[in-house]
């Protein structure tokens, strides 16, 4: 399993616009407006942000998962299972995952020129594909 930092704010992710523009994602205000939660509407499950840094080799395995075709997704996840995070690296995985593992969104970033820039597009998984990818976490 990947070591992932939870409790990040989705609004701070590079992929925030892609998440909030998805018609299956809802931003719900909590009781008396003291906070918000992001919800995957089809199942009503809360979504959490994830993020961690990885070595180049581990980043390559995660990139293979993000770029895998649906029919090769399970093999790519199996290959990436067990990669470890790095204390400091120029490769960063950011994403979102629903509590019920029916929704996952991932994007890989590289630190260059004093900022993180996308290596991959945002990849959104739902249903069975999301369940397969969530095995990494």
Image (cartoon, helix red, strand yellow):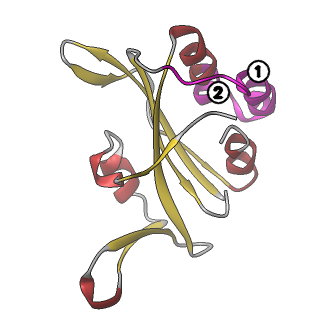
Residue at (73, 30) in percent of width and height: 77
Number of residues whose C-alpha sits closer than 10 Å to that of mark 1, classed few (under 14), some (14–19) or many (20 or more): some
Task: Confirm whether the magenta stretch covers residue 108.
Answer: no
Do tag 2 and tag 1 residues touch (Cβ < 8 Å)? yes
Give the secondary structure at mark 2: helix
Residue denoted by label 1: 79
Left or right: where 71 falls relative to 37 = right
Residue denoted by label 2: 65
Of the pair 52 and 37, the residue shown nearer to us: 52
Tell me residue 115's x, y (percent): 22, 22
Give the secondary structure at mark 1: helix
Q: Which residues are magenta?
A: 64-86
Residue at (63, 18) in percent of width and height: 61
Residue at (54, 17) in percent of width and height: 59
Mark in the foreground, 2 or 1: 1
Left or right: where 95 falls relative to 30 = right
- Locate the C terminus and report the quarter of the image it occupies: top right
Vertical order, 57 against 98 (above or below): above
Vertical order, 20 against 8 (above or below): below
Task: Confirm whether the magenta stretch covers residue 65.
Answer: yes
> Which quadrant holds residue 31?
bottom left
Extreme residue in the left direction: 114
**Magenta stretch: dominant SS?**
helix
> How much space separates mark 2 and mark 1, taking CA atoms?
9 Å
Tell me residue 38's x, y (percent): 42, 67
Extreme residue in the top direction: 57
Residue at (58, 9) in percent of width and height: 57
């Amino acid at each position: 399993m990947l070591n992932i930092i939870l409790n990040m704010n989705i609004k701070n992710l590079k992929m925030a616009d892609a998440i909030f523009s998805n018609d299956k994602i809802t931003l719900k205000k909590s009781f008396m407006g003291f906070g918000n939660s992001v919800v995957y509407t089809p199942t009503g499950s809360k979504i959490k942000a994830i993020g961690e840094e990885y070595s180049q080799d581990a980043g390559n395995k995660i990139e293979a998962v993000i770029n895998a075709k649906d029919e090769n997704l399970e093999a790519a996840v199996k290959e990436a299972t067990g990669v470890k995070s790095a204390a400091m690296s120029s490769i960063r995985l950011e994403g979102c995952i629903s509590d019920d593992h029916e929704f996952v969104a991932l994007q890989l970033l590289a630190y260059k020129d004093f900022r993180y820039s996308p290596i991959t597009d945002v990849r959104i998984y739902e249903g069975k594909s999301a369940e397969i990818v969530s095995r990494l976490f």
